[in-house]
Image: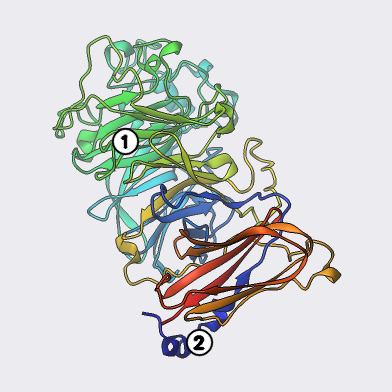
Amino acid sequence: MITKKLLTSIQCMTLILLSVQGYAQTQTVGLFLNDTVNTFKGYTLFAPKHNSMTYLIDNGGHKIHEWKTSIYPPGQTVYLLENGNLLRTCMTSSTLGTGGGEGGRIEEYNWNDSLVWSMDYSTNLHMQHHDIKRLPNGNIIMLVVEKKTIPEMLAAGFDTSNFQPDVATHGFFLPDEIVEIHPTYPSGGNVVWEWHVWDHLIQNFNATKSNYGVPSAHPELIDCAGDHKKLPLFWNHMNSIDYNADFDQIAVSSRGNSEVWIIDHSTTTSQAAGHTGGNRGKGGDLLYRWGNPITYGAGVAANQKYFQQHDVEWIKTGCPGAGNLTCFNNGVSLNYSTIDEIKPPVDALGNYSLTSGSAYGPSTFTWTYQGTPPSSMYSENISGAQRLPNGNTIICVGANGTFLEVTASGNLVWKYVNPTANTVPLYQGNNSPADSTHPDETLNSVFRVYRYPLNYAAFTGKDMTPGNFIEQYYPLTLNSPSESKDVFEAYPNPFTDHINIEYDLGRESNIEIMIYDHVGRLVKNLLSTKQESGRHSFNWNIGLNQELSAGLYFCVLQTPDMKKTLKIVRIE
């Protein structure tokens, strides 16, 4: 219960009376849509690619929390742990530049933004990149590139004439590996398990090599010819990693092959380097692959389903479709992106069925979402999607920093655009500048987002009071500054049974005054009318009918060309 005495004792009037004022001819950033009936209630975590801070916002677009101690941009994912700590990857300078998704460091911060653990994993031979995952035992699995020289490539049976020019320019090749770390606080960690693409190659180019064979007869192995196009320096280009605790399996998204690969984590490191051992008896060979069967000789170009996708992950227990796989299918060459869900052919023990000579199933998506028109949702790179407990899916259209939430039937119920560029938060009405180094991105790009439920353990005992919006607002000017005093105030504030709202309009305009609660739900539409220019006031008499419980609310004043928000508090 909020009381007058408590408010006085903690001297929070400064916060309560703080207002966020805004003016923009056209909204460009921040919250565009919040269907409070159909959205999944929670808090959204994101880290702008071109900044070092990480934000947690509510569905109303208000900043709930911020971590800003780190000096590194994300490299690329961030996660909120159940203990309230932030686990984030960091982009550092490295001699093994991949041309995208660089990392090299992992940091963990507590809720108060103090660094509690860090580990650097970047040398002239190996570099962490893109994504990590905290395992139930506290260990961390991470995507890593490892350097292979041209002589090593020749020894592995690669056709070096099939490389893109960047391989010869650098003189090396960067295939992927997966490394599991046991953190040692407050810094560093020990490698306790690893898996390497290099241990599971097959090729039909050089018959003198031990891995020579028929790729189509061995879908469990990775063809050195890849997707049968020119191979780039960053070959496999893994961009996401996920863990299935029920099966003790790992799923990775290989953008270079346009596939998802699933491997057995129950192996030892020695078994992971071979073809036997582990719960499935296949060592580190692929248990399942899907998205582009041409890569293992089981299809043609027309059978390709993934097009340089990102963020393949299992749908979590408690969510509709649990156990299925979702991904952000970037749609490179299609010029539109989709969110796709598949149901792998797996039994209760984690074994995947495959008819010899055929491609792995399924043949079609279980569910898919695309924009209307399709080209309205396109991100050539980065991006992600997460299935939510109510069946909705939250989407990060990463290249332009746009977050969407859609229902199972494809209805858009929430939309937010990252309001930060590469320096400071943007002003409402301004567009994010283009990224000169990535022509398909803007400087408000975001790699991925996650929505956490209101009852997530991380929030227990934390101050979740909504703050201001992240975006900045120009002072309100509807006519000229001399013609308006730009008043928007409410008194008494805090209030008990009534509150008076006073405001200025610089010109005749349609106006709405609405009340929202602290999670962005519309509580009351107080006024919707057309008014002349000048000073106006509206008295909201709540009386004793308990129309509004004690707590924090937001009074929103909106006209066709401006929006202003004022915090108000009702006390008993």
Could you say which is closer to the camera, residue 141 or residue 448?
448
Depth check, mark 1 against mark 2: the one in front is: 2
Disc 1 versus disc 2: distance between alpha carbons?
50 Å
Above or below 461: residue 73: above
Left or right of residue 418: residue 479: right
- Please provide percent x and percent y for residue 472: 66, 62
- Please provide percent x and percent y for residue 142: 36, 45
Residue for badge 2: 11
How many neighbours does mark 1 have within 10 angstroms: few (below 14), some (14-19), or many (20 or more)? many
| CB within 8 Å, label 1 to label 2 | no
Q: How is the image coloured?
A: rainbow
- Please provide percent x and percent y for residue 127: 45, 45
Tell me the element at label 2: loop
Left or right of residue 258: residue 265: left
Left or right of residue 404: residue 182: left
Tell me the element at label 1: strand
Is residue 7 visible in the rendered image? The answer is yes
Instruction: Give the total number of marks visible in the rendering.
Output: 2
Marks 1 and 2, the one that precedes in the sequence: 2
> In the image, what residue occupies the spot 39% across and 73% down?
546
Could you say which is closer to the camera, residue 23 or residue 439?
23
- Please provide percent x and percent y for residue 125: 44, 42
Which quarter shows the C terminus? bottom left
Quarter of the figure with residue 114: bottom left
How many neighbours does mark 2 have within 10 angstroms: few (below 14), some (14-19), or many (20 or more)? few
- Which label number is shown at residue 251? 1
Quarter of the figure with residue 215: top left
What residue type is disc 2 on?
A: Gln
Could you say which is closer to the camera, residue 352 or residue 143?
352
Is residue 184 visible in the rendered image? The answer is no
Which quarter shows the N terminus? bottom left
